[in-house]
Amino acid sequence: MFIGELSHRTGVSTRSLRYHEQQGLLRPQRRASGYREFDESDVDAVRRVRILLAAALNTDLIREVLPCMADEGSILAPTCEEMAQDLKAERERLSGSIQQLQAAHAMLSSTIHAGEAMTATAGGTE
């Protein structure tokens, strides 16, 4: 199948599919004309890549862990212990980012509430 059909079947834009290829996540065959030709297994490959992207993994890490992932339908499971450790490290990094974002959210909420309180107080004295 050509890239347009793969895009239609996966719901992923042709631009994203080209990027996935550029990053080494997809390896379509090339016809003599230069057109990319994908096979049925690429539909599943795109789904696996999208699952890992949704888990906030970058394409470098996806390229590394993808060969060691068993497909369990809606989830993927690491089959190599080393890859499982990499995924755990990435989860820890995300946990730190979540904590930082929660702290920033709390600070922004406090700032907004303080501003609303000042506006309400200033509006009430006129």
Image (cartoon, rainbow, N blue to C red):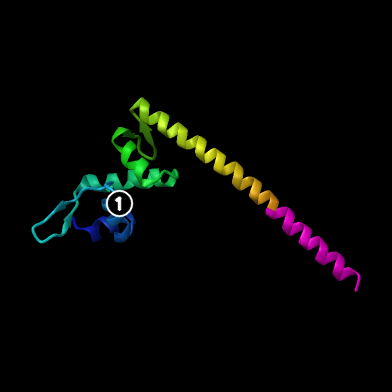
Where is residue 16 shown, x and y percent of the image?
Answer: 32, 57
Whether residue 98 is in magenta: the answer is no
Where is residue 58 shown, x and y percent of the image?
Answer: 40, 45
Q: Amino acid at mark 1?
A: His
Where is residue 79 shown, x and y percent of the image?
Answer: 33, 28
In what quadrant of the picture does the C terminus appear? bottom right
Per the image, label 1 sits on a secondary structure element best described as helix
Is 23 located above or below residue 121 in the figure?
Answer: above
Is 27 located above or below residue 35 in the figure?
Answer: above
- Crowding at mark 1 (Cα within 10 Å: few <14, some 14-19, many 20+): some
Furthest-left residue in this view? 32
Residue 125 lies left or right of residue 107; in this view the side is right
Residue 107 lies left or right of residue 74; in this view the side is right
Dominant secondary-structure state across the stretch colored magenta:
helix
Q: Residue at x 60, y 47 (%)?
A: 101
Residue 103 lies left or right of residue 14; in this view the side is right
Q: Quadrant of residue 117?
A: bottom right
In what quadrant of the picture does the N terminus appear? bottom left
Is 87 located above or below residue 34 in the figure?
Answer: above
Q: Residue at x 27, y 48 (%)?
A: 43
Furthest-bottom residue in this view? 126
Q: Residue at x 33, y 46 (%)?
A: 47
Specify the segment rendered in magenta.
Answer: 108-126
Q: Quadrant of residue 72?
A: top left
Where is residue 6 shown, x and y percent of the image?
Answer: 25, 55
Which residue is identified by label 1? 20
Return the residue nearer the eye: 66 or 96: 96
Whether residue 113 is in magenta: the answer is yes
Q: Residue at x 19, y 50 (%)?
A: 28
Furthest-top residue in this view? 81
Tally of numbered discs = 1
